[in-house]
Image (spheres, helix red, strand yellow):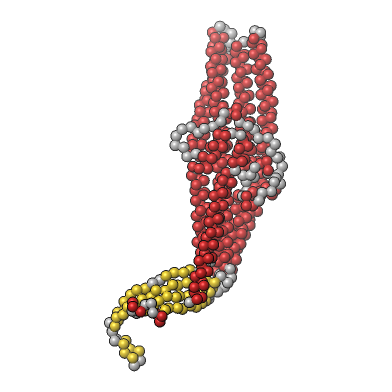
Amino acid sequence: MKKFLIILLTLTIVVPAAYARQSKSEIKHEQNKIHYLNLSWWEKYQDPILIDNIKKLYEVNYDLKNADLKVKENEKLVKIQFANELPMLSFDGSLGRQFRSSDQRFGDLLIPSFAQYNYQLPLTMTYEVDIWGQNRLKTKSVEQQLAIVKQAERATYITLTSDFTADYFNLIKTDKFLQIQNELVKIQEDIVAKTMKKYDAGLCTINEVLAEQKLLTQLKEEQNNLTEKEDVLSNSLRVYLSMKEGEPSRAKYEDLILLTGIPMQYDTTVIENRPDYLQEEANIKRMGFDVRIARKEFLPKFIIFGQIGLNAYDWGKLFNSYSQLFNAGILPSFDLFAGGRKMAMLKLRKYQYEEALNSYQKTILESIKEINLGLAGYKIAMENYDQSTERMKIQSKIYKLMEDKHDIGAASDIDVLYSREAHLLMQKEEISNKINYLISTISLYKAVGGIDLYSINAPVAREDI
């Protein structure tokens, strides 16, 4: 009786402590979600509207909500498996009446037909003694699966915030393009009108008129395409932000700030920040635990059981001292023949472990490739923007010279319009290269695993990711 009470007391201390440890894990998960958002990085773009949108994305996006639920589901799976490491205590009461319709004989003893009550109120405890550490390994395996799901959640945050920001910048570019395109269409309409006057005055051929009209239709077609693209990008942002109506807010093109001073080289250890690398690493550990579990399936199991309670045939005598029920023992279990199932499972786990190793090596190669492509894309985008900026300066000078020639009567109105068109087309190239520059930083951010590019070569603690 005293031993049983000691076991009960131990359970009241150990079990709540174990669940308290799980609760701390859930609190850390909530903190990680804010960490995964990485607002300190996005603030470097110096766009308050972008930050507000990302905060709203965090609150309302359904993909992020589902990723969070996946983590919570796997946390419960860890709890379920952890429960298998603990003793099980149950109450299985029995209150009934037994009827015997015929006589029973035990040797010379005759028991006539009878009916009697039977009252059993026992507490039953069972515990599988984890001699070989099999249950502990199963819990560790499930914990590694939880780590994989957490990295999948982190990958969802990185992907969604990056894709949203890329669409956000593309929408700003499209807004600016449409504004310029409207001006180009208006200028071309003026050119067509002036060319018609020249034709009427006999100063140009009909082919020149038709060429200008053809160019006008092309500009209007591009205007329509830009309008459609603006609608597509706006709808995309509305889906990200779970907006049923209204226009997503965005900054003006002129307010966008370029990021400069990002390192052009990286240490190969940067791949250790990537969610896919950490997932493969956790998967190797998980499969390693599963192989060890499969090996231990060949060993015997031992279950300790105990029962304490009350057993009586009369309700009035149920609480008497001689009605106490107590039994305990050990149940050994060993499979003598399982049809080769255990050996097949062991080989299966070994194959899965080798597969995990191969996936791990492939992920390392793919990660290095993606980071190299990201760095190359960033370098080219920066150089292209610099070149387009120089061309824009030259084109601005040409346009200014044309205006000066017009002021002194050395150039016609149509010449100024042509120069203005060339200036706007060059402006579109510069805008495109600037947005490409910004998006290249986002692509590099994704490639390195969602860390601040300015600290790309600084070591990152594992608990931070």
Q: Is residue 187 visible?
A: yes
Residue 169 picture location, percent across and down: 57, 33
Q: Residue at x 56, y 41 (%)?
A: 161
For this view, does 298 lie left or right of residue 268?
left
Q: Is residue 344 visible?
A: no
Residue 364 picture location, percent across and down: 66, 50
For this view, does 208 lie left or right of residue 458?
left
| The one of 351 and 211 positioned closer to us in this rendering | 351
Rendered view: 365 above or below 415: below
| The one of 136 and 227 positioned closer to us in this rendering | 136
Q: Residue at x 31, y 76 (%)?
A: 97
Residue 369 picture location, percent across and down: 66, 45
Rendered view: 388 above or below 448: above
Residue placed furthest toward the bottom = 108
Rendered view: 7 above or below 349: below
Quarter of the rendering containing residue 44: top right
Q: Residue at x 53, y 28 (%)?
A: 226
Residue 357 picture location, percent across and down: 63, 57
Q: Residue at x 50, y 66 (%)?
A: 12
Residue placed furthest toward the top = 201
